[in-house]
Image (spheres, rainbow, N blue to C red):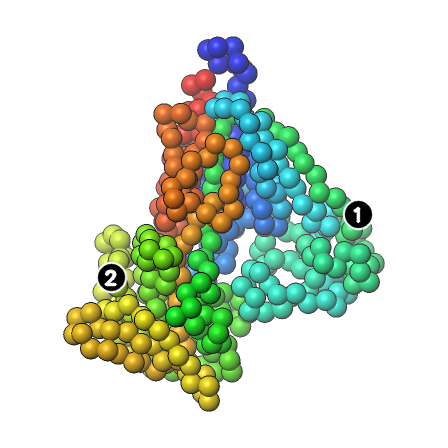
Amino acid sequence: MTDATGAPVSGSIMVVGGGISGLTTALEAAEVGYEVFLIEKNPYLGGRVAQLNQYFPKLCPPTCGLEINFRRIKDNPRIKVMTMAEVEKVDGGPGNYAVAVKIRPRYVNENCTCCGACADACQTEIASEFDFGMKQIKGAYLPFAMAFPARFVIDPRIVGTEDGKRAQAACAYDAVDLAMQPKTLNLNVGAIVWATGWAPYDAKKMDNLGFGKHKNIITNMMMERMAAPNGPTLGKITRPSDGKAPASIAFVQCAGSRDENYLPYCSYICCMASLKQTTYLRAQYPEAKIYIFYIDLRAPGYRYERFYENIKKDPNVFFIKGKVAEVSEDPATGDITVVAENAVTGEKIQQAVEMVVLATGMQPTAAVNKLPGAVKTTPDGFILNDYAAGGMFAAGCANKPADVVSSNQNATGMALKAIQTLVRR
């Protein structure tokens, strides 16, 4: 196929990022007949949604949406999935991109049956990135129970060690291959959709909020993992310092968002995430006192507004309009005192609680890891869509802060834009 000038045009689409936006983009394009290369840097698909306990609007567990998408991908031969892969180089233009993709070794091949013998034999323990370091896992591991591809991973730190040899010897299916090497694939595609997602803003950068100094201060994504049945505490929300059931919890909104020193924009999801996590706490601890410190509470849309109104009816949930200035710890009890000024009354508030949750902002991955090729971004790292030029597009949170529903809707549109690039050349 060639364009009007006689230049070659590829009929393939590359989707970079295997989170909910990337999955939707890939499926929408493949199910109308296009070849799709789905590139994901992690050993699994699912992105941030896979780490959640529940997500809006129906408060579904991740299995609710991901399981059917994994099945659709498995059943569609037009989608070529590459995990542990990153785009290194992009040349060319709309209709004809030459892309170099580097694939890191998993050290486990397609023979893997997920029997877990390699993990049983392994003695080395590492911090679980999936659980934000809140638990230890073996050096041979399955990222999470419903991970796709359903295949174990060998951490490179045990390759070349006695532990690596033990893991390999324990496998009855010759699935552990410690001789795997990195490789680079050169692909030709007509359009690229960047669905590179987001990362939680580093809470340690905000010295006044005490994350990393005080054990009983966690982030909102850590709370999601803690509340998840497959999380580090098997779904039980407890104080990190002593495993105690918290009788009082403070949520600190806009932790790093709407602040020119950190993230100057509203991260969109944080208010609703804290309200949702309030329901997690209420389900486990009906009498716990919950304090929500906020600048403005934003519930975008009728359904979210109703959710907010229902939370406000809870007599043990207290909303304080005021930006948190500092926190301190009682070394004897591990309790945290949150200091803020009430913007309505002008009163200085010092609220002691047993646990604090920081609603950290949503930072685009492209702000942390620069993308190759002629990708245009805002100063904050969100990818700009140039529809007139075509060829490369951003979907979901790579383009702007968004929830799961908005990301899915946007991803469908970006699949169409990618297809239009191919048919108009």
* 74 to the left or right of 344: right
Q: Label 1 sits on what residue type? A: Ala
Q: Secondary structure at mark 1?
A: loop
Give the Cα distance between marks 1 and 2. Answer: 54 Å
The answer to whether residue 282 is visible is no
Which residue corresponds to the image point at 45% horizontal and 17% vertical from the top-left?
425
**Would you place residue 230 above or below residue 333 in this image?**
above
| x, y percent for residue 208 | 39, 70
What is the number of callouts on the image?
2
Q: Secondary structure at mark 2?
A: loop
| x, y percent for residue 140 | 70, 60
- In which quarter of the view is residue 232 placed? bottom right
Q: Which residue is mark 2?
A: 296
Which residue corresponds to the image point at 25% horizontal and 69% vertical from the top-left?
322
Q: Label 2 sits on what residue type? A: Asp
- Along the line of sight, which residue is nearer the eye, 161 or 130? 161
Q: Which residue is mark 1?
A: 179
